[in-house]
Amino acid sequence: MSESQKVADRSDATPPGVNSVDRFFKISERGSTFAREIRGGFATFFTMAYILVLNPIILGSAKDKFGEQLDAVQLTTATALVAAVMTIIMGVGGNLPLALAAGLGLNAVVAFQIAPLMAWDDAMGLVVLEGLLICVLVVTGLREAVMHAIPQPLKQAISVGIGLFIAFIGFVDAGFVSRIPDAANTTVPVQLGGTGTLTGWPILVFCLGVLLTIGLLARKVKGAILISIVTMTVVAMIINSIADIKAWGLTTPAWPDKVVDTPDFGLIGDFSLFGAFGETTAITVVLLIFTLVLSDFFDTMGTVVGISAEAGLLDERGKVPNLGRVLLIDGAAAAAGGAASSSSATSYIESAAGVGEGARTGFSNLITGGLFGLALFLTPLLTIVPLQAAAPALVAVGFLMMTQVKHIDWDKYEIAIPAFLTIAVMPFTYSITNGIGAGFVAYVVIKAVLGKAKEIHWLMWGTSVLFLVYFAINPIEQILGVK
């Protein structure tokens, strides 16, 4: 969001100190209003509600070492519970508009890399250990120190890269962009639509949603993103009732057979903290935890910086408010996700949709967390929003975050090249962590080549070495004989 937009947002905010809630969350102080926070909370929920469907699909489709599978209904309950509790805790304790839920990518690692080596409770125990280790890094100050050691232009590049990344997520989730099924026989890895052309009513809903969202944003309509999501959901429901379409994806825009469902808490607490060490080698366990920690560590770092920058909350030195508490809560969320058998919970970049709607404080989290709480009982009702109706929000927010690219000095190659790699690698590899790693390593190498090694913070050296290990994890495993 541009500076002029942020100033304009602050100009019509409510007067400071309206009530104790306003003062506690600093709503007026940050140039927001209760209406914006509420709209932002709804927008964030609707752009990440897909996790209630997707997480059970990913974890529930995998088998552990003994051929056991997790129950999908129990997974849905665990996913909603952790998201509700940790999002509210982040709002109250961290006071950032940053929602949390089971992390995509991390859940795939648990399902397809860790679970085949051990029982499910042992795998979830590793997730708990990962979360506890991150909490230790926060308490010792190391995690916060790493974030402060990052040069400001790289932080801006992280935000821009995340903007392109979530826009790409929006295009892919909606089916506007798809993988080519037999990519080995072509030099083009992705294509327009499912066949090289745009076909079907769901794609039309997405395209109309993008046009509606950008039109409302251009006219500076309050609630533009949320208006678009609700409007296109209604349109999708009408279309689906007439055409009975089967290609919506994870969620179908149709009124459910039942609105209320009973939650099943059977997976809560079903984990074994050290059971993994009895199922596989200690080296394998250590490498698995290292992979989880590094991914979670830097995914969160990029998300927190990106969301805070877009909300205009970074101070003059590029620091995030309440950073220590935010990182500690995020680490605790990872452990909570493992304890609930829903995989590691982490901060969601889709929170940018709420920021784009005006959210600037943790009050919006009360709304998002409350909706996840309702989802424990109203999952059939709250998951009728199709991805094609929610994805336009990600595309629009991607644009808003992209505007920060103007703050990077592109004439200064020692920062411009690492910034470029950070921005490019995120969407091209579908990973925030990979983009940050590429930028870090390039920054250190270029500085060293230019004879400016003394200007590099020692933590940048250390994290860059860790990233080299991360990128070379496969040959390292082969050298160590890890299967």
Image (tube, rainbow, N blue to C red):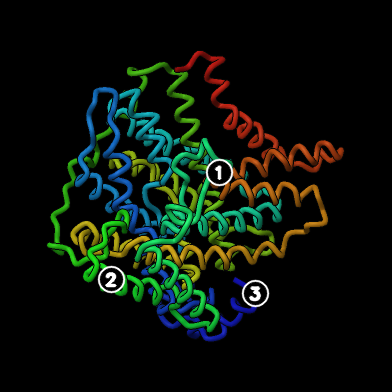
Q: Earlier in the sequence, mark 1 or mark 3?
A: 3
First in sequence: mark 3 vs mark 2: 3
Splitting the image into 4 quarters, where does residue 247 fall? bottom left
- Quarter of the figure that contains the C terminus: top left
Which disc number belongs to residue 3? Answer: 3
Q: Nearer the viewer, mark 3 or mark 2?
A: 2
The residue furthest right is: 451
Q: Secondary structure at mark 3?
A: helix
Query: The N terminus is located in which quarter?
Result: bottom right
The residue indicated by pointer 1 is 429
- Locate residue 395, reporting x and y percent: 50, 64
Left or right position of 452 against 361: right
Label 2 Cα neighbours within 10 Å, binned few <14 / some 14-19 / many ≥20: some
Q: How many angstroms separate mark 3 from mark 2 (CA)?
A: 40 Å
Position of 238 relative to 417 (above/below): below
Q: Which type of secondary structure does the marked residue at label 2 adopt?
A: helix
